[in-house]
Image (cartoon, helix red, strand yellow):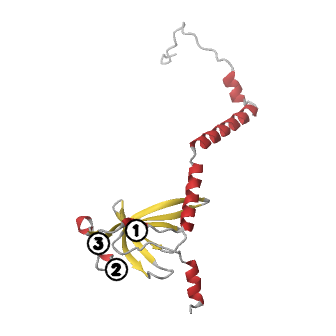
Amino acid sequence: MKSLAQKISDKQKKSAVVDVRSGDVVRVHQKIREGNKERIQVFEGLVIRVSRKNSLTSTFTVRRIASGIGVEKTFLMHSPGLLKVEVVRRSKVRRNYLTYMRSLTGKSARLSGVEFDRAAVNTIHDEVAEAEEAKIHEEQVESYDPEAAKAEKEAEKAEADAVIAEEPQTDAEKLEAQPVEKASAAEPAEDQNKEK
């Protein structure tokens, strides 16, 4: 018989998750919310740590080098903000925590690859995450629709033109509108450096 805490955690877990292991190179699709906009950010790197694999609080740490600086992110496996995890490459490792990779750079940081069935590992159907990703994609397409953006800009321009036409002219604009007398070039200009 399950305890109340186990029942609640089972309810919060995702139905299926990708089998992520230390030494994998993964591509993580994360939902980022900025104000009232949402977008999907992809973070690709080496998994250097996997903790509490069968728990609701299972996490994995991904490390990558960005502009010469090591960046590590820890993701909750069952988080609703985590839309998709793809295993790109799998490597042969003999440890669970690859913290020694932090001090290695260049060729010494390479791991020997292992062949695996990429399609079988990455084929996970989480309907909730797929629906969320599709919704975000539709919102981005709507917001980046070039025809709608062009029509919106034309409407704003027409509105601005209407406001400008309604405004009374200021004294400076009235002076600019008046014709200006031009100096005739028939007479030579006076020399300003002459002593008087």
Give the residue at x 47% y 73%: 17
Give the residue at x 40% y 78%: 50
Distance from disc 3 to disc 1, alpha carbons, whole Å, reads: 33 Å
Instruction: Find residue 129 and name its label.
Output: none
Other residues around mark 3 within 10 Å, as few (<14) / some (14–19) / many (≥20): few
Residue at the far left in the pictured view: 107
Which amino acid lies under the numbered mark 3 shown in the image of this protein?
A: Ser
Other residues around mark 1 within 10 Å, as few (<14) / some (14–19) / many (≥20): few
Nearest the camera: 133 or 186?
133
Distance from disc 3 to disc 2, alpha carbons, whole Å, reads: 17 Å
Q: Which mark lies nearer to you, 3 or 1?
A: 1
**Which residue has dot 1 on it?**
120
**Which residue has dot 2 on it?**
96
Instruction: Find residue 103 and name its label.
Output: 3
Nearest the camera: 44 or 191?
44
Q: Position of residue 29 (x, y in %)?
A: 47, 64
Give the residue at x 60% y 43%: 149
Q: Position of residue 152 (x, y in %)?
A: 64, 42
Q: Is residue 101 above or below residue 1?
A: above
Other residues around mark 2 within 10 Å, as few (<14) / some (14–19) / many (≥20): some
Q: Quadrant of residue 62?
A: bottom left
Q: Position of residue 161 (x, y in %)?
A: 69, 34
One can see residue 38 in this view: no
Dots 3 and 1: beta carbons under 8 Å?
no
Dots 3 and 2: beta carbons under 8 Å?
no
Q: Which mark lies nearer to you, 3 or 2?
A: 2
Which amino acid lies under the numbered mark 2 shown in the image of this protein?
A: Asn
Q: Is residue 117 above or below residue 165?
A: below
